[in-house]
Amino acid sequence: MSFAWLWPYVRRHRSAILAVMALAALTSALSAVQPYLSKLIIDDGLLGRHFHLLAELCAAIVALAGCGFALGALNRLLYVRVSGNILFAIREDVYAHILRLPPAFFRVRPVGDIVTRLDGDVAEIQRFSTDSVLAVVNGVLLLIFSAAIMAAMSPDLTLIAACILPLHLLLRHRARRQVSESTREVREWRGVITHFLVETLGAAKAVQSAGAERWERDRLGGLNQGLLRRVVRQQLVGYTIGALSSLLSHLTTAVVFIIGGWEVIHGSLTVGTLVAFTAYLARGTGSATSLMGLYTAYQRAGVSLKRVQELRDVEPMRAGGGGARVLAARSGPIRFQAVSFRYPDSERALFEGLTLDIAAGSKVVLFGDSGAGKSTLIDLLRGFVQPDCGRILLDGADLSDYDLQSVRCRIPVLETDPVLFRGSILDNLRYGHFDAPAERVFEAARQTGVEPFVLALPEGYATELGSRGAGLSTGQRQRVAVARALLGSPFALVLDEATSNLDAAAARAMHALIDRYFPQQTRIVITHSPDAVPRADRILALRDGRVIDGELARAYA
Ligand SMILES: Nc1ncnc2c1ncn2[C@@H]1O[C@H](COP(=O)(O)OP(=O)(O)OP(=O)(O)O)[C@@H](O)[C@H]1O
Ligand SMILES: [Mg+2]
């Protein structure tokens, strides 16, 4: 799997990244000088009985440490900013990409899985990059500086210490599969739990209605136990690697003390050099161990990166649209021409050679048994699914020539349960028509009967709605949806069982509203009770994948 797609994100910040690298090099160099100063303190100051030099060297140690901290802090700040910006840009782009995916994607992919990837996995990558990338730069530089100074002080001891390094590498390399696998399992399981929470909390009322609170709690308990088993395995893998690695480091120190001590006793090495050497060794092995640890962290972050990349690699919407034509803001003819369609996971074709003409500005009632394909027909019209063969013509032009966004905006669907979002009523009214001036929005709200109930709310149009529009009744949300449609100057308006939640009087009022404000527009009214729809120009029945027109359709009603 190639991570080349990340390059453009990094490239944008390359000067800041270069500054980070330069600062890191400077910090590491400062820190590498410290043990050498302690060698000078012991050999030249202490043993050389030169107090003035000793005091100066001590002052230098403090000054260098101070500079090192200041530079380190500055670098960290800069790096967190840069890495945060890179990762958030990735998250925003992947999110935008997901929003362009076809409905089929959301059906097969649990929303919890997507959320975990966009949230947990991106955070994991960020954690890795903020904590680790800087540590790699510092670690590598410190290791190089330490090794160079160590080699200059005592080549044979350096060689002995270096012999143990390949064992570290071997250990990390052998463990890499367990690391990736245990990490992937934990991340996937977190996705399952997030999905569970999103699904059940999003439908808390349904859970309460079924008296299923205990049942769901127990289900969460079961999922938690599954997660715990996986986390324990992941931790065990990490701990074992860390412990073995630290054992190897201790081994190196012990060997250096035995051989270096022997040399000091026999006068071929000064005490100061041995002390400084072990200090460099501690730094060197410290950075080698943390670099090895980073190798493990890199594998974990790699799992997360792949999971984000998988989302990014899902093909965007292929259905319908894709052209540049913008659908007109007034109605024109709609034509389904010999359209055949079958859902990919279904054996039977839903439509075969369906042909249907809807005249501009007409009001058409479409009814049929549940599952006959009414909503699918509208999804075809709005480019959410694509016909297997045949064409859909809007205003005489093929649907595939149109820009999908304009098609969906200009053919709004009023549903049984309109979707509103958390936010103010004003924002919800102009959702999809973000540039509409407030005055136009208020006018639409007045016309569609939204105003009376909004003004009765404590903060009027600024009243914040809860999740999914909580705070308004279904009928009120429907009115908001009608006002929204009015803002968009529709090419056609679809009512997909929009009145099924309303009592007979409210349903009549809703139809009157639609007829009054959209008299020139094509209206497609999907309903199970065609006789309750006033002033229809045509009545169509959908049956066995065909459209039956006129009186015959009435006979089925
Ligand atoms: N995404 C899908 N994948 C596979 N089959 C689907 C999918 N969506 C709908 N179907 C099937 O296609 C058929 C038509 O569904 P559709 O929702 O269009 O029916 P409908 O006429 O709108 O029904 P209702 O009156 O109940 O709303 C149904 O048999 C349904 O099971
Ligand atoms: Mg339907």
Image: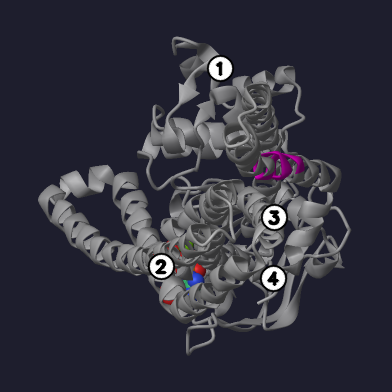
Element type where label 3 sits in the image: helix
How many marks the image carries: the answer is 4
Viewer-nearest of discs 4 and 3: 3
Viewer-nearest of discs 1 and 3: 3
Q: Nearer the N terminus, badge 3 or badge 2? A: 3
Element type where label 2 sits in the image: helix
The answer to whether residue 461 is above or below residue 303 is above
- In the displayed structure, does residue 416 sit left or right of residue 83? left
Extent of the magenta region: 26-32
Residue 85 in picture, x, y percent from top left: 70, 42
How packed is label 1: few (under 14 Cα within 10 Å), some, or many (20 or more)?
many
Asked where in the image residue 402 lies, by quadrant, the reply is: bottom right
From the image, which quarter does the N terminus lie in? Answer: bottom right
From the image, which quarter does the C terminus lie in? Answer: bottom left
Q: Nearer the viewer, residue 399 or 17?
A: 17
Element type where label 1 sits in the image: helix
Between the residue at mark 4 and the residue at mark 2, the CA separation in whole angstroms equals: 63 Å
Which residue is drawn at the image coordinates 65% and 27% (left, top)? Answer: 50
The answer to whether residue 278 is above or below residue 308 is above
What's the amino acid at mark 2? Answer: Leu
